[in-house]
Amino acid sequence: MFELEKISKSFNELTALADVNLKIAKEHTTVFIGPSGCGKSTLIRVLMGLIEPDHGVVHYEGVPVNADSAMLLRRRMGYVTQGGGLFPHLTAWRNIALMAQYLGRSKDDIRNRVNELLALTNLSPDVLNRYPTQLSGGQRQRVALARALMLDPTVLMLDEPFGALDPIVRYQLQTDLRDIFRGLGKTVVMVTHDIGEAGFFGDHIVLLREGGIVQQGSIHDFVHRPSDPFVEHFISAQRTLLDSLEGGT
């Protein structure tokens, strides 16, 4: 789905990405993980063409992602941020339908698609006339997911989508989203700082440090074949979560 070749990006004197080479498989969930400031959010924005790299090339299904192509390519990508990123002056319905309306889809098509997404995301029709401030954190994230899926994108991008949620809501939403991803067969790229969450979702996990890839592979690879002391330390810091995860698989 994506191929990155020698991607580098700096902001003033800060190196966010340093010579990153990566392939992201179609219809798999790839998770970017690492400490704060490691470059994972920058990387997902480079994939979407929201940020242009200083050096290197990103290909999306064989097409270079650049200033000329990014706008059209992003219509094939759904994007969910921490907190949902909903427009506060729009109702849930208008948030979900926004891009479809902008592209001139018919009212019947939009209504039918919204109804499909309500069922898919376990949202009650009652929320559609509410504004984001009138929704719970879990509801906001479900509305954000419905909005991201509105145009039936080929890939979903999620940048720490559970970070602002309390543990009970977070657990339920994680379970529901994993079922949705598996049912739809979408390519998913997710950012998190939580190795347990990465193992729960990820077919392929990419650990970053200071803008570079330290190790990539399955959760089993990280637990049993860490590539260097940094990986071991990162894993051991969240060992309780991993023990619980491994015990259930």
Image (cartoon, rainbow, N blue to C red):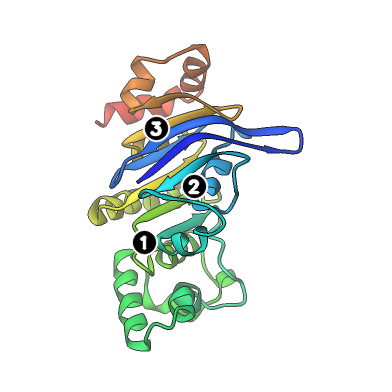
Residue type of the residue flagged with mark 1: Pro
- Quadrant location of the C terminus in the rendered image: top left
Q: Position of 112 compared to 127: left or right?
A: left
> What mark, if any, has residue 94 been given in the picture?
none
Q: Position of 64 compared to 53: left or right?
A: left
Look at discs 2 and 1 and give the one toward the viewer: 2
Q: Residue at x 37, y 54 (%)?
A: 155
In which image quadrant can residue 42 be found?
top right
Q: CA distance from mark 3 to mark 2?
A: 16 Å
Of residues 115 and 12, the one drawn nearer to the viewer in this rendering: 12
Q: Is residue 185 above or below residue 30?
A: below
Q: Which residue is mark 1?
A: 153
Q: CA distance from mark 2 to mark 1?
A: 14 Å
Secondary structure type for disc 3: strand
Contact? badges 1 and 3 (CB < 8 Å): no
Q: Which residue is mark 3?
A: 205
Q: Residue at x 33, y 70 (%)?
A: 117
Q: Position of residue 114 (x, y in %)?
A: 36, 76
Report the label total. Answer: 3
Residue type of the residue flagged with mark 2: Leu
Q: Position of 18 compared to 14: left or right?
A: left
Say whether disc 3 or disc 2 marks the residue closer to the N-terminus: 2
Say whether disc 2 or disc 1 marks the residue closer to the N-terminus: 2
Q: Position of residue 13 (x, y in %)?
A: 76, 33
Q: CA distance from mark 1 to mark 3?
A: 22 Å
Q: Residue at x 32, y 54 (%)?
A: 176
Q: Label 2: few (<14), some or many (≥20) within 10 Å?
A: many
Q: Position of 109 compared to 10: left or right?
A: left
Q: Which residue is mark 2?
A: 47
